[in-house]
Each structure stands twice: as structure tokens, then as C-alpha cells.
Image (cartoon, rainbow, N blue to C red):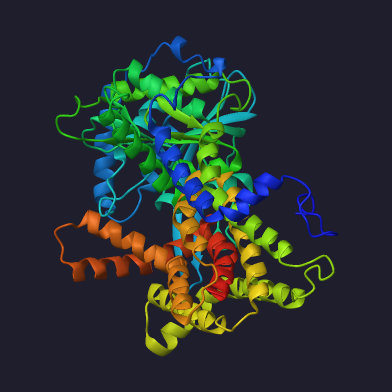
């Protein structure tokens, strides 16, 4: 700020016209930027703004791969066998059968036992086992590898069984075990317990444990080279009419765009319908209808990316620098002819043979992008412009407050009436409260079980509500107006910094933050009456994480169950809120999802600062 202001004379020496606009027309400029940023972000879905996809890495050579997979009957035999085995284990996984199949195919077979020690509430251990086989490359030593994975889902699982993907994996291994052109090891992996099994296997493979000791991953007997890429299969045992390519990973990470484009291109070559977010590209992307379809696809991607939760097992590879996607099969009557294992095998073969040509890791194409379809993308250089405009109002308001503080004091006082100790103490206190709340769940779970016999999710949820109410009441003491304005200035700067920092990895989360929080925090200025102060605090209350969660889930429940009555929708959203808080905790502690950490340790202290200074 010293560059823009002359603190000796109290007069501004540089950028006078800009400073006058920022101060005099601050409210209008802020809301203009906010609205213009939203319109700019929406326009990204228009085909003239987005770009057509292309493959940057020439070494992939997708057009030169001549498909040789012709094992339709073999895949169906494997499918019949695994269905018979699955009927014997309605709630478990046929480890011995899968390991025996890998052994018969001549692969190096290994198993991994893992344990999840659930330490929130009643301490419970969950056990599982992964089975994998390694096809060793004949042309090179085991320095590099690629992974073909599939989650196993027992017959009694709430999810659609993926026996079709496991059958395709075994047929692929049998068809190409004797091929001499493989330059990389191929790891065939079948995981148990969905995300947990994949997380445990990756931790054991890389000998790391980011899950705070909750997951005992053990060790792996067999290993291959450094993993370059991975494909996860979620192919049902029944019919599938299209392939949906899933890309969102942990904490909003995305695979290299070349890998995504490779999968779509090979699907088109085999005349298989490929989709993104289960949506087919519009026939005319330049029409209004096409624009709205592209916008829905882009917003659907942003909604899933913002949560930080992977859309498939592929999402856990990204934090290890491994590019990965999931190929999921779905059936929709009348959409397309059923896909045979012949086409699916050719697609998987094409992807792996293209990966086999890589001389180095993916690096040519984008890692930060948004997709509005299978053939359109928006790069980071494009979407950061409207986002920056949308998030700029908080920075402009902070600059305006600072300049106003400087202007309101002459050179002799030089802000001496500002109580620096109190301002710094309040800021530190709010962040200490956030750190304390980070340790709340385990304590709340124990107290809720001991005194009220609550379930763990209820104990944690009500614990957060009670703690939030207590903190809000503690932070309702009066603050001198000049101190309140200084605190508000710092709070605006912190919020803007948080949004821009988040945008560097998860643009979707940062955009929704800016969309929801910016207008609410802009309305926390000085009020001249108690009624005005009450109204300002009510606005800030809407920005509390629990309030945002309830509003979002209420709208989602209304959209999902339009036939339900309002009380029923309210109860469904309340139940979903309890589960969401618990899922967020487990994602943080077990998988390393940063949503809970960011919300409690960064966003909530900023909210406390705005709550304290609202109307003052």
C-alpha cells in the first residue's frame, strides 16, 4: 500500500484518478465486476470462446495403433465364471479365484491385506484385500509400468457390479501376454471396498501413508516400475450403450488432457458412443440449445470437481503424478447399439499401446482446464480472466477501506488511533478458534455417544452447530469503528487470497466460493442503527459453512424429489447434511481431501472476522 500512498503528507501521489474511482464509486465498481465476472464465466461454454480438443503428445500415435484384440468369446467365458464365483460370496470378494486366474495367465501375482482403523466414535476396524498381477515387459527392465484396474463389487453391493470390467481385464491379459512389443510392465489390479482399496494399494506401492495412520496398507510382495498412467474400468456385467469418461480426482486434480482426448478419439474410431458427465455433445454447439447443453455439462463438471471427491478410483493416482481416467459403461435404451467386448477390448488395447509409445511422462497438454463436452475445452488462461473479475470486488473493497483510513487521518496522527494490538489479537484469536474446531470431531463423537447415545454423524454435526453458536456469541463484543474497518480490510484480503490460491488447483471450488461469498461479505459494512447491525449480521450468517451446506442440500433435495412435500424435503436435506459432514471428515482423515481442512482452518476464521465486524 505504501507504493500507492504518501504517508508523510497524507496525500496520494500516484494513480490519483484510479484511486478516486476505487473510493468514490467502490460499491458500483464492485458489483459491476461481480456481475460481469459471472456473465464472463457463463460465456465460457459458448463454442466461439472454448477451443477444440487435440492431442499434443505426438508420441501417443493413436491413429497408428492397429487393433488386434479379438477375444469376445474369451471375455464372455470369464464373465460367466466370475458370476458363478460371485454368487458364492454375496458380501465378499473371490480372492482365490482372481489370483488363480492371474496365475494361470503367467502373471506375477500378489495380494495385499489392508486395515482401516476407524477412530471417530466407536473404534472399529475394517479389513480388505486387493489382488494384482504383473505382466512383465519383454523389451525393457521393470523401470516403467501402466495400470489397468477395476473395483470389485459383490452381488449385495449398493453399486452396480463391475464384473464386466474384470472379465475384460482377464481377456486382455490373456490376449497380449505373449506380445513382444510391450516396453512397460502392465499391472492388472482388482480392488476391494471401492476408494479405500485403491488408496491402500497406492500407499503401499509408493511406501507412503498420508492418511494419518488410519489405514494400515502393509507391503507388496510384487512390484513393477514407476507408474506412468492408469485406466480404471467400471464396466457392468450387463449391456452398455455408451462409455462415460470420468476425470475428476482427489482435491479437484485432473489428468493431462491428452489422456482424456486419447480415450474419446479411440472410442470414436471404434464407433462407440463416448460421453462426458453422461452427456452427448450437441449437434450444433453454436445454437442457443447447444450453448445451454454445453453450459450444463461444464457446470456438472464443476459441481463434482468442487467437492474434491474423486468420481472413480482413478482419482487417487493424480497426487502421485500419475495420469489416470475411468471408463464407465452405462446402458440407456434407444441411445446406441449395445457395446460388445470386442469394441471395448480394442479401445483398451489402443490406449495401452499408445501409452506404450511414450518416452516420458505426460507434459505437453493442459493439466488445468474445464470441459464443456467431449470435444471442447477451456484452458486456465481463459477461465482465470472471468474468475479474477468475479473475485476482484473483495480486493477492491479492501483497497478502498485502506485508502479511506489513510485519508481520514492527517500526517501527524498517521493512524496512531488504530489499536494495532487489539486488531492483531482478534485476528489471531479467530484463527485459534478455527484450529480448535479442527480437533472437535473426535471429542464430539465421544461426548455424544456417552451422554446422549447419538450416532457418530449426529454427534459431530450437533457438535459443530453448538460450537458455532458459542463462538458467534463470544464474537459479538463491540469494537472501535476504526479497528473494525481495519479488521474488515484484512478479512477481505484473506478471503480474496484464499479464493485465488484455491483457483490454482480447484477452479470450480474457487468459482463457487466467489459466487456465494463475494456479495455476502461485501454487504458487511458499517450500519448506523441496531436494526442495520442485525441485518448485516444476518447477511454474514448466510455465509456460514453450515448455512451454505443446508441451502445447497435443500435445493438439491428439491430438484431430486420434486414430488415430496416441503417437510419431507427439509428432513431429507437435514439427514444429508449430517452425512455430508461425516463424509467430509472421513475424506480428510483417510484420503487426504482438503475440503474440510480448508473450510475449518481458513474459511471459518475469515467468516468469524466478518461476523465480528458486521455493521461496526
Residue, x 33% and y 61% (percent of image)?
Answer: 553
- The answer to whether residue 505 is left or right of residue 289 is right
Q: In the rendering, at what x and y percent does residue 57 appear?
A: 56, 19
Image quadrant holding the N terminus, namely: bottom right
Q: Nearer the viewer, residue 12 or 497?
A: 12
Residue, x 72% and y 62% (percent of image)?
Answer: 407
Q: Nearer the viewer, residue 30 or 94?
A: 30
Q: In the rendering, at what x and y percent does residue 56 appear?
A: 54, 19
Q: Nearer the viewer, residue 233 or 335?
A: 335
Relative vertical location of residue 11 with respect to residue 161 in this rendering, above or below: below
- Count the marks: 0
Image quadrant holding the C terminus, namely: bottom right
Q: Nearer the viewer, residue 201 or 73?
A: 201
Q: In the rendering, at what x and y percent does residue 302 appear?
A: 42, 44
Q: In the rendering, at what x and y percent does residue 393 appear?
A: 55, 52
Q: Residue furthest bottom?
A: 451
> In the picture, residue 49 is in which quadrant?
top left
Residue 392 visible in the shown view:
yes
Relative vertical location of residue 541 with respect to residue 522 in this rendering, above or below: below
Residue 176 visible in the shown view:
no
Residue, x 23% and y 59% (percent of image)?
Answer: 558
Residue, x 44% and y 63% (percent of image)?
Answer: 126
- The answer to whether residue 480 is left or right of residue 262 is right
Amino acid at each position: 500500500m505504501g507504493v500507492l500512498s504518501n504517508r508523510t503528507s497524507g496525500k496520494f501521489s500516484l494513480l490519483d484518478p484510479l484511486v478516486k474511482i476505487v473510493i468514490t464509486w467502490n460499491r458500483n465498481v464492485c458489483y459491476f465486476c461481480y456481475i460481469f465476472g459471472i456473465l464472463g464465466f457463463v460465456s465460457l461454454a459458448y463454442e466461439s470462446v472454448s477451443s477444440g480438443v487435440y492431442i499434443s503428445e505426438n508420441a501417443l500415435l493413436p491413429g497408428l495403433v492397429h487393433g488386434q484384440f479379438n477375444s469376445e468369446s474369451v471375455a464372455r467365458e470369464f464373465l460367466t465364471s466370475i458370476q458363478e464365483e460371485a454368487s458364492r460370496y454375496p458380501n465378499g470378494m473371490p480372492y482365490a479365484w482372481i489370483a488363480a486366474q492371474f496365475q494361470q495367465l503367467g502373471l506375477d501375482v500378489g495380494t495385499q491385506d489392508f486395515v482401516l482403523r476407524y477412530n471417530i466414535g466407536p473404534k472399529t476396524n475394517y479389513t480388505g484385500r486387493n489382488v494384482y498381477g504383473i505382466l512383465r515387459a519383454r523389451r525393457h527392465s521393470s523401470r516403467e509400468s501402466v495400470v489397468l484396474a477395476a473395483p470389485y463389487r459383490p452381488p449385495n453391493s449398493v453399486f452396480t457390479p463391475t464384473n464386466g470390467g474384470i472379465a475384460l481385464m482377464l481377456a486382455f491379459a490373456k490376449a497380449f501376454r505373449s506380445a513382444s512389443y510391450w516396453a512397460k510392465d502392465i499391472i492388472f489390479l482388482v480392488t476391494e471396498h471401492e476408494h479405500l482399496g485403491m488408496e491402500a494399494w497406492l500407499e503401499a506401492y509408493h511406501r507412503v501413508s498420508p492418511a494419518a495412520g488410519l489405514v494400515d496398507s502393509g507391503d507388496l510382495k510384487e512390484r513393477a516400475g514407476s507408474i506412468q498412467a492408469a485406466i480404471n474400468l467400471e464396466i457392468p456385467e450387463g449391456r452398455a450403450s455408451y462409455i462415460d469418461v470420468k476425470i475428476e480426482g482427489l482435491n479437484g486434480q485432473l489428468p493431462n488432457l491428452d489422456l482424456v482426448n486419447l480415450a474419446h478419439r479411440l472410442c470414436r474410431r471404434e464407433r462407440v458412443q463416448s460421453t462426458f458427465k453422461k452427456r452427448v455433445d450437441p449437434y450444433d454447439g453454436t445454437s442457443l440449445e447447444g450453448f445451454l447443453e454445453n453450459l450444463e455439462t461444464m457446470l456438472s463438471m464443476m459441481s463434482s470437481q468442487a467437492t474434491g471427491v474423486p468420481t472413480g478410483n482413478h482419482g487417487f493416482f493424480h497426487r502421485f503424478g500419475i495420469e489416470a481416467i475411468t471408463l464407465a459403461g452405462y446402458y440407456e435404451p434407444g441411445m446406441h447399439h449395445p457395446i460388445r467386448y470386442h469394441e471395448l477390448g480394442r479401445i483398451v488395447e489402443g490406449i495401452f499401446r499408445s501409452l506404450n509409445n511414450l518416452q516420458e511422462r505426460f507434459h505437453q497438454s493442459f493439466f488445468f482446464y474445464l470441459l464443456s463436452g467431449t470435444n471442447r475445452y477451456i484452458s486456465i488462461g481463459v477461465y482465470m480472466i472471468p474468475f479474477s473479475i468475479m473475485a476482484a470486488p473483495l480486493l477492491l473493497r479492501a483497497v478502498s477501506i485502506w485508502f479511506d483510513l489513510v485519508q481520514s487521518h492527517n500526517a501527524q496522527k498517521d493512524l496512531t488511533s488504530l489499536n494495532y494490538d487489539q486488531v492483531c489479537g482478534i485476528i489471531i484469536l479467530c484463527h485459534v478458534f478455527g484450529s480448535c474446531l479442527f480437533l472437535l470431531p473426535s471429542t464430539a463423537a465421544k461426548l455424544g455417544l456417552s451422554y446422549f447415545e447419538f450416532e457418530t454423524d449426529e454427534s459431530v454435526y450437533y457438535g459443530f452447530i453448538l460450537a458455532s453458536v458459542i463462538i458467534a456469541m463470544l464474537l459479538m463484543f463491540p469494537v472501535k469503528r476504526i479497528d473494525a474497518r481495519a479488521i474488515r480490510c484484512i478479512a477481505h484480503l484473506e478471503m480474496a487470497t484464499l479464493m485465488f490460491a484455491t483457483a490454482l488447483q480447484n477452479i470450480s471450488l474457487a468459482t463457487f466460493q466467489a459466487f456465494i461469498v463475494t456479495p455476502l461479505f461485501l454487504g458487511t459494512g458499517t450500519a448506523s442503527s441496531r436494526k442495520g447491525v442485525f441485518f448485516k449480521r444476518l447477511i454474514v450468517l448466510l455465509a456460514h459453512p453450515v448455512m451454505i451446506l443446508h441451502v445447497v442440500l435443500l435445493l438439491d433435495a428439491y430438484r431430486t424429489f420434486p414430488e415430496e412435500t416441503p417437510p419431507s424435503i427439509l428432513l431429507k436435506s437435514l439427514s444429508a447434511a449430517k452425512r455430508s459432514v461425516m463424509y467430509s471428515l472421513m475424506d480428510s482423515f483417510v484420503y487426504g481431501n482438503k475440503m474440510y481442512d480448508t473450510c475449518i482452518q481458513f474459511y471459518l476464521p475469515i467468516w468469524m472476522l466478518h461476523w465480528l465486524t458486521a455493521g461496526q
